[in-house]
Image (cartoon, coloured by chain):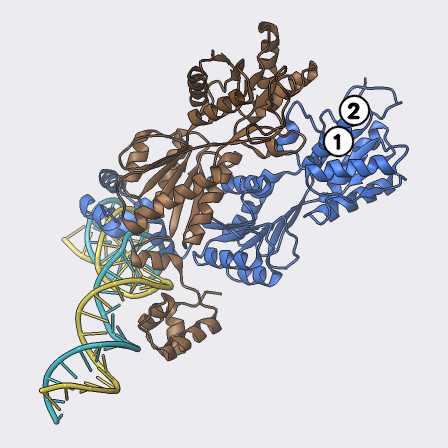
Chain colours: A blue, B brown, C yellow, D cyan
Amino acid sequence: MTRPTMADVAARAGVSRALVSLVMRGSPKVSAQRRQAVLRAAEELGYSPHAMARSLASRTSTLLGVMVSDLHNAFFAEVVDGLEEVASDRGFELIINTGGRRAARERRAVASLLSFRPAGLALLGPVVAASVIADAAGSTPVVLVARSCRLSTVDSINDDGRVGSGLAVNHLVRLGHSRIVHFDGGSGSQAAQRRRGYVAAMRAHGLEPVVLHSEYTDTAGARTVARLLERFDPLPTAIVAANDVNAIGAISALDAVGLRVPGDISVIGYDNTSLSALAHIGLTTIDQPRHDMGRLAAEALLQRVRHGRTAPVHHLLRPTLVERASTAAPPGRPARGRRQGGAG
Amino acid sequence: MTRPTMADVAARAGVSRALVSLVMRGSPKVSAQRRQAVLRAAEELGYSPHAMARSLASRTSTLLGVMVSDLHNAFFAEVVDGLEEVASDRGFELIINTGGRRAARERRAVASLLSFRPAGLALLGPVVAASVIADAAGSTPVVLVARSCRLSTVDSINDDGRVGSGLAVNHLVRLGHSRIVHFDGGSGSQAAQRRRGYVAAMRAHGLEPVVLHSEYTDTAGARTVARLLERFDPLPTAIVAANDVNAIGAISALDAVGLRVPGDISVIGYDNTSLSALAHIGLTTIDQPRHDMGRLAAEALLQRVRHGRTAPVHHLLRPTLVERASTAAPPGRPARGRRQGGAG
DNA sequence: CCAACAAATTAGAGCGCTCCAATGCTGTAA
DNA sequence: TTACAGCATTGGAGCGCTCTAATTTGTTGG
């Protein structure tokens, strides 16, 4: 029942425990003959090294702690996926727990992860106080994802919500739009940045920004369309929605009153969820490189671990425009194909 | 830099290391006075026990290994969420890696998890050979999720795809439908079971089953509608789609030729993805209790760990019908509200 | 044939903890 | 006073490994 240990392998191979240790760690200073003997003995006994004992003895860890505010959220699940990819590639494992967006639970979750003395700690969308983060950073490298916090001791990975909204506005302006409104995400995360990006981009084009309060849900998107119809005449020709779900709600509300997307009005989402990619919906949207964020987070930790970097890095990733079928030239303009610009 | 150990706390509190150990484990056989002293010393030094050293010494683990075939997939992400909920509730942590649906990688992933000597191992949708699973089960409790494999040593958690399709058919029959077709999921996971459940339920109602080959994508759903329109006259009055995405594709294709859902034809999905809940779509669908599957998986492991259960358990969860707006009585029948039955 | 050196191997302490057996300490009964 | 509980406390071995320093083995040159 109890698994074989290094001593068992050593006994079977007729060598010392230390030699088995060297073989297991792939040391070059072992004769080919003994190596074979050890490997065979290990094979026969079904031996594999005990990672915890190894970690304790060597005072190093191959564990990366990950505190996810909410795994249910597809955004974080993909970040974790990216983290895992890099980690396992480099021989590290992820140890994960969640904080449920509650500071007290997050604090306990972080403490629990730290009790394993991980090589590093990634906090995904934490709501916990900066002091807790600083504390953690005192005992292991820490990287923050989707949370900015300019401590001098932690790395951070964020996407640039301002740039994203700017891309959306630029795309619409290029198509010929000028009456472009923004449905904002209220108090949701990143909403403020997206709003600022929209306003800045509009001003940069000499256009008047119009922000309608909304939320990150489809019903909010639909309600905001209703307000739009009441208050605006003429209607705007394009909507920069708070996110994809909000855009879907807006589109269905427009559809319900006989307005065609993109024929009468263009709509652009944000997040590039799997939703937006459905052929039926074909939503033009802004993609956040979630997977890359996870990868970069892992890289940041491993750089500190393996290369002893101490200066903080702060990645601000550029989102990209994913053009699909919900945007086109405004009505009255020459109808062009979905591709703007180009030689045709 | 280096964190304080038990010896540091003992020295500061003026007691032995063993006493500190007792206090840390909450033993009742410590005088209140010493306990205070130890706790204060620990507090002052910022001491917290080293989980790995503890685990090594006590020959127990508070780690549950989780091998996910694909975290990118929302289904598994939610299962992990359920696992995590129960685990952290019981003082366990999850250690996670992925196998990318490739047997060789999965084998390595499992080995890597086992090297931490976890208290148990959950395999989510593994494709690896049964022998590998049996091996793992030799050294720690194992639970399989979304993979049936009747080894006598492992537990399993699955949803019953046959029951789910049966629910869909029953629902439609109750609404008055009799010409009900199934778009199947081809060779996708669970597709065969859903197909069998559909066929069996139709036969049970004395109806003729009609299965059209399709796939788990929206474009496949649309293509299959095209085939339906070519070949069937009269058209069926209801479609049991392969899954939600397939249903969305079907609905948009029906919409494109002027057929109304549910006015002209009812459509029912499968999976209850976040997609189906959008107000705009309002897809009637079959819900798999993903979160519960994760919870049950964790419970199964912990029962073996804590209560020494050895007999395998095999949970086959009943999916449930989630009624929304894409199903109604067939045309020609008295139009009723969305709720069938009842006193009204 | 032996010193000198490099390469291969090993003994043993130690990582931070748990756990068992042993110790000290009080108070009560004989 | 001694004996003996009963409880609180402690010493020390040991969990499975790594790592340093020491030892053994093998090779070469004088």
| Rendered residue at 43%/15% (across/down) | B203
Other residues around mark 2 within 10 Å, as few (<14) / some (14–19) / many (≥20): some
Tell me the quarter of the image containing the C terminus of chain B. top right
Circles 1 and 2, Cβ within 8 Å, touching? The answer is no
Does any portion of residue A60 appear in the rendered image?
A: yes
Residue A137 as seen in the image, left or right of residue B105: right
SS for dot 2: loop
Q: Residue A58: name its quadrant.
A: bottom left
- Mark on residue A260? 2
Residue type indicated by callout 1: Ala
Secondary element at image label 1: helix
Q: Please tell me in which quadrant of the rendered image residue A295 appears.
A: top right
Q: Position of residue A185 (x, y in %)?
A: 72, 44
Closer to us: A223 or A9: A223
Position in image of residue B150 (x %, y %): 30, 30
Q: State the residue in front, B162 or A116.
A: B162
> Is residue A26 visible to us here?
no
Query: Which residue is denoted by mark 1 in the rendering?
Result: A253
